[in-house]
Amino acid sequence: ETGVTQSPTHLIKTRGQQVTLRCSSQSGHNTVSWYQQALGQGPQFIFQYYREEENGRGNFPPRFSGLQFPNYSSELNVNALELDDSALYLCASSLERRDYGYTFGSGTRLTVV
Amino acid sequence: AQKVTQAQTEISVVEKEDVTLDCVYETRDTTYYLFWYKQPPSGELVFLIRRNSFDEQNEISGRYSWNFQKSTSSFNFTITASQVVDSAVYFCALSEATRNNAGNMLTFGGGTRLMVKP
């Protein structure tokens, strides 16, 4: 079975631009969570999507938004990029909303200049 | 609110030494899950263990062992006879299993960078 795949692996954007990151969940997993990991810190929860609806959100502003598609893949969109948005963005999928068996992808490294 | 503290930011050991990574957590819930993840330079988080709050038995898996003590809110991780391949950042994480934790969010500690020298 395939794991969680994220694209692109690296990205450089200019302050004020918009970015879309993509995640394909592990086969059979219907729940996707996104995390932001700044350099030298632990990951922080952005939000979770379950069956195409947002199912919980961390302390992130509305310019962070997401989508989940019928095949359970997901996108993370960030508008009006700021320098502090530079981070590793990790996607994790799980079998069900209340399942605690998370599988993480390798992440997208976003640099905002 | 849930919180995880990993006081050791960096540990350096010589191969074959034993090393313990500390994790202290805070939660008001009686039902929760604790995790350890390994993050190699490639970036992905590799799952090591999940423990629920009702199971305080220590666990051993090969060279890895975990000591869960609710009385001190700690969930420490020991690597016996460390190897160079164990070099990575290790994260302890907590998830409260309550209805209020919409999204089952994981709260991570700041991580401990382990360097094992040959």
Image: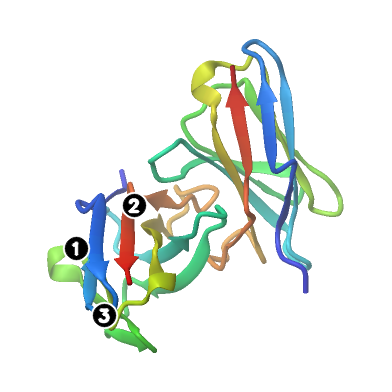
Residue B5, horizontal then vertical, whole percent: 24, 50
Dot 1 or dot 3: first in sequence order is 3
Mark-to-mark CA distance, 1 and 3: 11 Å
Q: Quadrant of the N terminus of chain A?
A: bottom right
Binning the other alpha carbons within 10 Å of mark 1 as few (below 14), some (14 to 19) or many (20 upward) gives some
User: Which residue is disc 1 drawn over?
Assistant: B73
Q: Residue at x 32, y 61 (%)?
A: B115
User: Which residue is disc 2 drawn over?
Assistant: B111
Q: Secondary structure at mark 2?
A: loop
Chain letter of the residue carrying label 3 = B
Would you identify the image quadrant in which residue B33 lies?
bottom left
User: Which residue is disc 3 drawn over?
Assistant: B56
Amino acid on which disc 2 is placed: Gly
Chain letter of the residue carrying label 1 = B
Would you identify the image quadrant in which residue A10 lies?
top right
Binning the other alpha carbons within 10 Å of mark 2 as few (below 14), some (14 to 19) or many (20 upward) gives many
- Closer to us: A24 or B40: B40
